[in-house]
Amino acid sequence: MQLSNRIKSLSESQTIAMARRSRELKAQGIDIISLSLGEPDFKTPDFIKQAAKTAIDGDFSYYTHVSGYLELRQAIANKLKRDNNLNYTADNIVVSTGAKQSIANVVLSLINPGDEVLVPAPYWVSYLEIIKLAEGKSIVIKTNIDSDFKVTPEQLKKAITPKTRMLIFSTPCNPTGSVYSKAELKAIAHLIAQYPDIYIISDEIYEHINFVGKHECMAQFDNIKERVITINGVSKGFAMTGWRVGYIAAPLDIAKACDKMQGQFTSATCSIAQKATHAAMEMETATIEPMRKAFESRKNIVVKLLKEIDGLRVNNPQGAFYVFPDVSAYFGKSSGNAVIKNATDLCAYLLDKAHVALVPGEAFGDDNYLRISYATSEDKLAEAIKRIKNALAELK
């Protein structure tokens, strides 16, 4: 069989690969604690589920507008005004089958072969692969734990060339949990405003899992608003991963382009999931505050326990539900037949020895780190880190 060069050039998501390996070991009866997937362990709020049940009983089971039915898009626009003070109409909103499709729609609509996209690292696993599908070129800009994994305007300016077409990043960030302040975003906006051909994809899917207070949007700055595409959805903040609903808020021409693109791939996402999302958009955010508080409590526990392990360097994430420790102090060490050359080796060792599944930093652009998801119970987190600590102590 001759597969296309396009599919052969794509890398498998390492988060999905690690989750699959965890399931295989669990099927063998091994007690695996998986801290690999970015999925809340909470249940979808009951009133959101009820909205879906009502939609089913009301036979809301037909095709909707490709971008989502009008009242849902208006509800999203209202949410953006209420929560973020952003002014959009329903025509600026495109609802898709998950935020991943939202990102792909935008990149495929704006990037031509050879166009350059600035990607601060660590980055979410799919950014580079989506850019690759569009035949663009990813320009990776390294950050590290000392800068709280945040890119600076100076770094961006050095990377900009006449071929630069886009900047893509997330705040709160997957995989680091870093959150950009208003001042930091404003400084980036001031730089990009000087380059009228550069667009910004601001991935804000973790908006509601934020431990520093008010979420700040890149699109709030008037000097670049018409070149900012905000990505959001319901998977993380509303515990709705399986519902598969994401959306963009974008300038009208880009929204129309994404509607056109989506119309040839999937058309509209599930009508029942859209009704559930409509309920989520109209809810008071206080309803999901207990979930945010639980994540913050878990984060504090995980950071405290990790800092007690010799050799790990850990920052204090301010959002999402990840910790991204520097594990390079263990490179060159070994235990039995296991030799640790990088974080990928270390993740394999910890899976085999400690039965804890993590994701190596290579998936996110830096193999000196690994990602720990704390989207599970405090008891499991404590047990997982105990296992990690014991396994690391055996490396000499």
Image: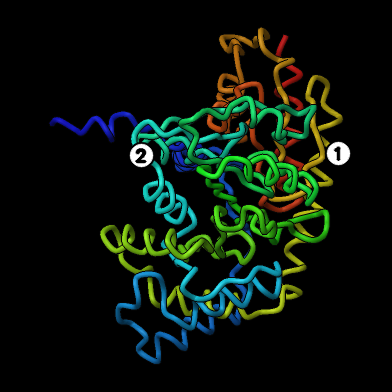
Q: Residues within 10 Å of mark 1 (few under 14, many from 20)?
A: few
Residue name at image x 45 percent, y 73 percent: 273
Q: Residues within 10 Å of mark 2 (few under 14, many from 20)?
A: some
Residue 33 visible in the shown view = no
The x and y percentages for residue 32 are 58, 39
Q: Secondary structure at mark 1?
A: helix
Q: Which of 321 and 191 lies nearest the eye of the viewer?
A: 191
Quadrant of the rendered image containing residue 332: top right
> Mark number for residue 10?
none
The x and y percentages for residue 16 are 46, 41
Q: Which of 232 and 30 lies nearest the eye of the viewer?
A: 232
Q: Which of 192 and 41 lies nearest the eye of the viewer?
A: 192
Q: Look at label 1 and name its amino acid.
A: Lys
Discs 2/1, front: 2
Quadrant, the C terminus: top right
Q: Look at label 2 and name its amino acid.
A: Asn
Which of the two labelled residues, at mark 2 and mark 1, occupies the earlier sequence position?
A: 2
Tell whether 333 sits left or right of 232. Answer: right
Count the numbered circles shown.
2
Residue name at image x 13 percent, y 31 percent: 1
Q: Secondary structure at mark 2?
A: loop
The x and y percentages for residue 91 are 46, 73
Distance from disc 2 to disc 1, alpha carbons, whole Å, reads: 46 Å
> Mark number for residue 112?
2
Residue name at image x 76 percent, y 51 percent: 378
Looking at the image, which residue sits at the far bottom?
A: 58
Tell whether 103 sits left or right of 352. Answer: left
Query: Would you say the residues marked 2 and 1 are in contact, meaning their CB atoms lie under 8 Å apart?
Result: no
Residue 302 visible in the shown view = yes
Quadrant of the rendered image containing residue 257: bottom left
Q: Which of 270 and 191 lies nearest the eye of the viewer?
A: 191
Residue pointed to by mark 1: 304
